[in-house]
Amino acid sequence: MLSDQYAFPEKTIYSSAHDEAAAKGAYRFQKNPTISEELLLQAHYDCVLERAGRHSIVLGVHDTTTLNFSSQSQKEDTGTLQTEESRVFLLHPLVLFSPDKLCLGVIDTNLWSRDPQEFGKSKDRSNRPIEEKESYRWLLSYRQLAETQSRLKNTEMVSVSDAESDIYDLFVEAQSHSQGPTLLVRASHNRSLEEDVQKLWPYMESHRSSFEIELEIPRKAKQPARTSQARVTYAPVTLKAPSQKQGDSVELYAVYVRELDPPEGVEAVSWMLLTTRRIRKPKQGLMLIKWYAARWSIEIFFKTLKTSCRILKDQTQKIGRFPITLAFKLILTWRIMYLTHLGRECPEISSQEAFEEAEWRALWCYCHKTPHSPYAPPSLQEATKMLARLGGYKQWKKNQVPGPQTLAKGLSILTAITDMWRIMNQKESMPEIYL
């Protein structure tokens, strides 16, 4: 079933089946009450741990995205968001990346929806304990990362998250794990400090330990990617416990990044990063900035899940079936991103690292309009570009490389031409001729 889905990532589990028997089997599979999302993802988790164990540093990036099914009024288990008529799931996965942004896979998922009966009662939720709030998901992801690190003795895990995770309980949680993952959070609150300058931002702006760097800023909406000069300030800080919390202060390190010359009309980049990792030298601060910049990879993950794997086109209605579909789509999203990154960062390795022999031979014959394929497989870069051309890729610029959406489109066509290649290259049994 997963192989069928990989061939047609934009289709549903049912419609991607290769024949009628497989389609019926997929339908029964989704209805089977003994099948769970955790069960389906377990084999993937094991492979993720194996890949992560090959790296000394692994980034556990987590964030929340909305899966909006408002056009499907009968969708079961969905909840409200901005309006009472919304039909939305909230998804919070924990995705592992290497520091060079190679996607290693998903090790934890948290899927939930807001109770329609609670719509409009956000003020009441602020007084609840952390365990009853949606923000508790950040602590759960950190604990899962800590459990993963305990199984990988030679790998340091780094929990990377955006400003929404600036939660005092998360800092306390990280401090309680003396041998746990490094915490790296972008701050959003101007917290009170134990230092002479009582607030975080004024304290970091007045600190003298600073240096300048050239900052690579990725494309955002209609703003193109750019390179800009930035000033970096780093210092240890001691955060006071909020007035509504009981407990001691938390000792962290702060890295403050400020863009110096933003383009006209563009808001300057300003990152206040808080971490449990000790920073004594500019080199260590630079490393933390690089790790945080990898957080954008999870945005690409979400985009691939929604646009290439078409998770929002799912039509399952009955309770318990959507998580099954989601488990398949999460694995497919990882596979597409993994292939995309390898083609960019490891272009000279053999295409056999990612393609079966029949696949790369079919690609070669189709793209070169010849019945003959080479003896040795092409490089991965060459194979991924041929695959991308199936999906409509046009290399207008010399350094332009195909993205995950283009490769996902090419995979659908690759299945058809591979099947035809196998048919045309079958070795028919020849009748014996007696002389």
Image (tube, helix red, strand yellow):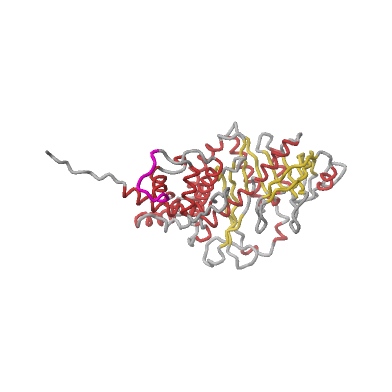
Assess whether residue 139 is covered by the magenta stretch: no
From the top left corner, tell me how far across and down residue 87 is, in percent.
58, 64
Q: Residue furthest top?
A: 154
Q: Residue furthest left?
A: 435
Task: Point out the stretch of residues depicted in magenta.
Answer: 366-375
Quarter of the rendering containing residue 361? top left
From the top left corner, tell me how far across and down residue 100 is, in percent.
61, 41
- Magenta stretch, main secondary structure class: loop
Q: Is residue 365 above or below residue 10?
A: above
279 sits to left or right of 399: right
Using the rendered image of the protein, determine whether residue 149 is visible from the camera's viewpoint: yes
The residue depicted at 66 percent of the width and 52 percent of the height is 225
Q: Is residue 397 above or below residue 232?
A: below
Q: Residue furthest right?
A: 196
Viewer-nearest residue: 122 or 235: 235
Viewer-nearest residue: 141 or 411: 411
Q: Is residue 360 above or below residue 10?
A: above
